[in-house]
Amino acid sequence: MDVKKAALLVGALVIAIAAALMARSMFSASSGGAPGATASAVANQENGPFVLVATKALPVGTIIDEQSFRFQPWPKELLEEAYYLKGKAEPQALQGSVVRNAITAGQPVTQGALIKPGERGFLAAALGAGMRAVTVPVSQQSSVAGFIFPGDRVDLLVTQQIQGDEADNSLKVAETVVRNLRVLATDQRTNAMDENGQPVVKTYSNVTLEVTPRIAEKIAVAQTVGQLSLSLRSIADNRQDLDAAIANGDVTLPDGNDPAAEKQALASIAARPDDGRISFSTGADVSRFERRTMPVRKVAEENKPKGPIVRVARGASVDEVELKGN
């Protein structure tokens, strides 16, 4: 009986060892073939088609730049004729285009989703709901030496000189009348990139801005008041202004815990123009020899009568006549 038990134990041990060796052999073969399969998949991706996809969410009206898209491997069976393929499309030529249909992050960019500069409806697609496009004249000095491009955000300044009487100095003053305006185009040129995708600095004499109807009226008046200048804003300024507005309770965020709705509301608030804060600097802020207050203006006395006045009635009308002479 003991011999039988020993024989059974030995047999079971042999079977266990054999099963372990077989399992080891199977795992080793599987692991040995993985690198080859992985390398083959990578090779297929590198040799396969590359499609232009959005690197971030691009809402309607977005002016795209070189950071808005990239080429990514794409399955051949899912290719569409409307996709931009690597080797056939020039990304530099797409910079400055406007998104006509919303594109989500990672989604292929289609030809119908973009409106290129010069095409019909370009400005209408670039404008947000309820916004207007106005063009203001600028010079090389008043437009940051040509370093303002479509998609940038600027502040609008008005510089004027208020005259007093002949014996008094005039008041020189500069006012920031509108903040956070989006640049749509410069002299009908929305893409200022060379063949290498680098910005090309060119001088221009007109800049088209996105404004509200109320701000459009203010800008029309500002052009008759004095000289207009543009001040380029930093990207970080919008976030700082938004944080300050939230802290002061000047903005209202949506109710609930929807992160997407909150993010959309914050983006909308950060992008809106601001004409409620007007700051100014006078000549005295620059030089001690300039004025800080309004100059005194004398009342015009040219048409003021010098002699006695007689009222003459002719029917229903009454005229005032000045008596001259001795």
Image (cartoon, helix red, strand yellow):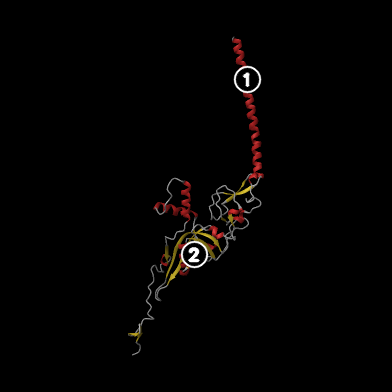
Residue 122 seen from this side:
yes
Compared across the picture, whether 224 is left or right of 77 comes to left
Q: Is residue 161 above or below residue 43?
A: below
Q: Is residue 150 visible?
A: no
How far is disc 1 from disc 2 in space, using C-alphas?
Answer: 90 Å
Above-or-below relation of 267 to 326: above
Count residues near mark 2 (Cα–Cα under 10 Å), then give few for <14, some for 14-19, many for 20+: many
Disc 1 crowd rating (10 Å Cα; few below 14, some 14-19, many 20+) is few
Per the image, the residue denoted by label 1 is 15
Which residue in the structure is indicated by mark 2?
229
Q: Quadrant of the C terminus?
A: bottom left
**For residue 169, above or below residue 199:** below
* 221 to the left or right of 40: left
Residue 65 left/right relative to 299 = right
Q: Assign the N terminus to one quadrant of the image.
A: top right
Secondary structure under the numbered disc 2 in the rendered image:
strand
Disc nearer the start of the sequence (1/2):
1
- Picture coordinates of residue 153 (x, y %)? 50, 58
Q: What element carries label 1?
A: helix
Q: In the rendering, which numbered label is found on residue 154? A: none
Q: Nearer the viewer, residue 194 or 44?
A: 44
Residue type at tag 1: Ile
